[in-house]
Amino acid sequence: MSQHDDAQPAWILHARPYRETSLLVDALTLNHGRVGFVARGVRGARAQPLRAALQPLQALLLVLKGRGELPMLVSAEVKDRAVALSGRPLLSAFYINELLTVLLPRHEPCAELFWRYAMCINALADEAAPAWQLRCFERDLLQTLGYAMPLDTDAVAGAPIDPATSYRFDPERGAIPVRAGSPESVSGLALLALTQAAPPSAAVQTELRHLMRRMIRWQLGGRELRSWRILAELERSSSTPTMPLLTPQAALSALPASGPSKD
């Protein structure tokens, strides 16, 4: 990584202890995409304000210096207060941070995804159609990774998608017509909804949730995300669905430190 002398807008994705007094931090930046860096000497009592600034869901201006995979933190200036989330919205933030840390390669500029991330996090805080924001973020992340889902054309006949037809979405080919009720089928209405800005009905969003999970699992080579397991355990549990004890530190500190093979 080349030297960075200018302050860089960034969101903190993940931080974990490193050696005795330092942190290894992952951040999503405006001009450099996902970056990792070392924050030295931030785990002592005197450095508590800086350590607090390097928590997930915090928007910062970062100055990094150094070459190689892990530059050093020079300064971190808090832009706004960290987004306050709890319960399901916090788990949703955990999910998109995990998506970025396991799928997005480091040091590849992705300014549009940076702004989509900010929009999604703020939507979770405002509770403004958060599920729809997640679906749009998943779609845009896949596009950033070089996989733009063909959502408006039948992969077999090349005809426009029919809202009343059922399809099986093949990750490599696209939408293939199938009988209604077929396993893993999705309606043409749902596919077309993912090309629009306005959120569709709850039923359509449920279809899209299952579709996008299949697409992401395919990108992961069949592996599961930790956030999916947490959600499944939550749905099986009889505990309070808002998860009052789930804090940002407890949920987001469980993220993997970096992508598996794309760093």
Image: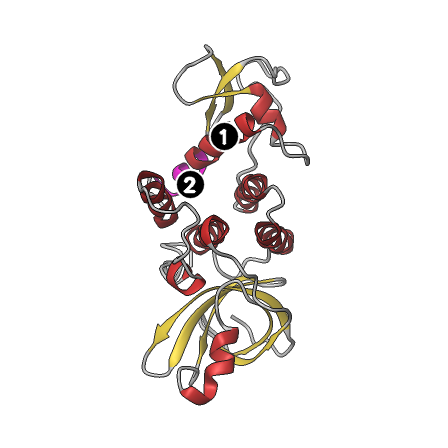
User: At 61% from the left edge and 18% from the top edge, which residue is drawn?
Assistant: 161
Mark 1 vs mark 2, CA separation in Å: 20 Å
Nearer to the camera, 56 or 238: 238
Going by the numbered disc 2, the residue's amino acid type is Gln
User: Would residue 218 be counted in the magenta stretch?
Assistant: yes
Magenta segment's dominant SS is helix
Return the residue found at the far right: 197
Q: In the rendered structure, find residue 206 and report the number of the disc placed on it.
A: 1
Locate residue 70: give its quadrant.
bottom left
User: Would residue 27 be counted in the magenta stretch?
Assistant: no
Circle 2 SS class: helix
The residue range painted magenta reads: 215-221
Circle 1 SS class: helix
Q: Where is residue 96 in the image (x, y as percent from the top left)?
A: 49, 50
Callout 1 touching callout 2 (CB < 8 Å):
no
Q: In this view, does 45 lie to the left or right of 144?
A: left
Mark 1 nearby-residue class (10 Å; few <14, some 14–19, many ≥20): some
**Viewport quadrant of the C terminus:** bottom left
Q: Position of residue 224 (x, y in %)?
A: 34, 43
> Which numbered disc flags the more N-terminal residue, 1 or 2?
1
Q: Where is residue 236 in the image (x, y as percent from the top left)?
A: 31, 39
Q: In the rendered structure, find residue 219 and report the number of the disc placed on it.
A: 2
Going by the numbered disc 1, the residue's amino acid type is Thr
Nearer to the camera, 4 or 134: 134
